[in-house]
Image (cartoon, rainbow, N blue to C red):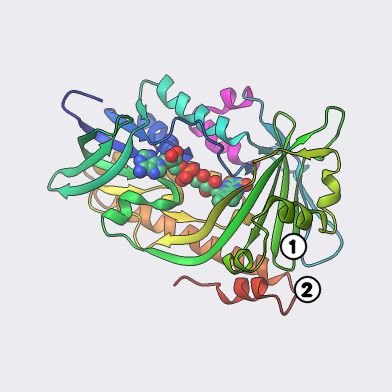
Amino acid sequence: MSQSNTYRVVVIGGGVAGSAAALSLLSQGVSDVLVIEASQYEQVRIGESVPPDIRLLLLKLGVWETFLSEGHEPCLGSCSLWGDDRPGYNDFLFNPHGHGWHLNRQRFDAFLAESVKARDIKIESGIRFQKCEEFEDGVHLWVKNRQEETIKLSAHFVIDATGQSANLAKGLGAKKQLLDQLVCMIGFFELSECGDFTQQTLLEAVEDGWWYVAKLPNRRVVAAFATDREVIKQTTILEKEAWLNYLKKTTYIGEQLTECSFIEDSLIVRQAPSFLLDRSVGKRWLAVGDAASTFDPISSQGIYKALADGIEAGAAISNYLSGNKNNLDGYDSFIKDRFQDYLNNRNYFYSTENRWPESRFWKNRRSRGFLT
Ligand SMILES: Cc1cc2nc3c(=O)[nH]c(=O)nc-3n(C[C@H](O)[C@H](O)[C@H](O)COP(=O)(O)OP(=O)(O)OC[C@H]3O[C@@H](n4cnc5c(N)ncnc54)[C@H](O)[C@@H]3O)c2cc1C
């Protein structure tokens, strides 16, 4: 960090949205940017399916060619049992942008951070944001380093890219408007050496939720079960054996995993809420990616959204810093309009599954189709 500890822009969170915002600021000619990231990119990161048009965003950020050499797994489309006992297919064959991808997510986030660093933007990992306070010309930030020492920083503008915790935005008074609170249990498998696995994303609705399976790079396969907190409380599904048994009982997905062995201790639980901040901008801050809004993982849009927000944010902040204050309202509308589109699509999608009229999970999805 610089001697004075004052920056033009500080980005809090070096995930997809934070790195995209830093790259976008650079392309808009905004210098003196610092990205702080709590982790060292050492832990498993969840969320890996991205659509073909991710290419347009990675091209815009100037990282497409390097992305291609990173060894991610092509995704050719999806096969789903949803609203019907027979599989339905949606493939990318005729998509003008080619196929989608199943990412090695940890690698992808680290790659974006390396791209930030390679362009001489300062990115400091192992630094955790703690609290903030607005002042006339900017925002003071208190962060903790790896030695647990507190450091004070100041910035003329701050980006909240802390993911679903939205730490900075909440600290500055923004409120989450909640739509849904799914919980996902995710496990990893290893594909046997001569085993083959489809390059489609597999999706299957069941009575208490839905399953998702995808082949990842390095012969890994991920399986995730999305459900309600009540289901978790009333069953033993958090235990590995129960989770594996439930997976086996599915109509289609379970039998696709016969050539895969479960990786011991790989089962993890993640909250997957859908929410929208009541405001994604303040006087000298804005929120990007999951800090501004989160989508149901069924949409496979979270990573795309994080990149798109980062790009928009870079343009809005550059304009703001050159004196056009209205641009931040435009950014806020961009986030809200897109959430409304997502809400319409999400509600329609869940309304097409009617095979379990008495299931609490499906009733919940239908009754919780609005923000609270
Ligand atoms: C179970 C599940 C499955 C999903 N599947 C998909 C999928 O298939 N496809 C898809 O597109 N999306 C998927 N998503 C959504 C996707 O993962 C997110 O939308 C995406 O990660 C958002 O990126 P982000 O950069 O906004 O936030 P994050 O990825 O959460 O990054 C936030 C960053 O901020 C850092 N940070 C947090 N707090 C602090 C702090 N106090 N100080 C400093 N740094 C901090 C974190 O370490 C992290 O690096 C899924 C989500 C879940 C929960």
Instruction: Report the magenta residues as a range.
Output: 51-69
Q: Secondary structure at mark 1?
A: strand
Distance, label 1 to label 2, CA atoms, is: 9 Å
Residue 59 among those drawn in magenta: yes
The residue tagged 1 is: 205
Q: Residue 31 occupies which quadrant of the picture?
A: top left
Q: Secondary structure at mark 2?
A: loop
Residue at image location 54% in from the left, 44% down from the top:
303
The number of numbered badges drawn on the structure is 2
Residue 143 at x, y percent in the picture? 27, 38
Residue 160 appears left or right of 360 = left
Residue at image location 36% in from the left, 20% down from the top:
120
Q: Depth check: give the residue in front, 111 or 220.
A: 220
Residue 19 at x, y percent in the picture? 43, 34
Q: Depth check: give the residue in front, 363 or 95.
A: 363
Q: Main secondary structure of the magenta part?
A: helix
* Amino acid found under the numbered disc labelled 2: Arg
Tag shown at residue 355: 2
Examine the rendered structure and indicate whether residue 93 appears above or below residue 357. above
* Amino acid found under the numbered disc labelled 1: Ala
Examine the rendered structure and indicate whether residue 183 appears above or below residue 179. above
Residue 197 at x, y percent in the picture? 82, 38
Farthest bottom residue? 358
Residue at image location 86% in from the left, 49% down from the top:
255
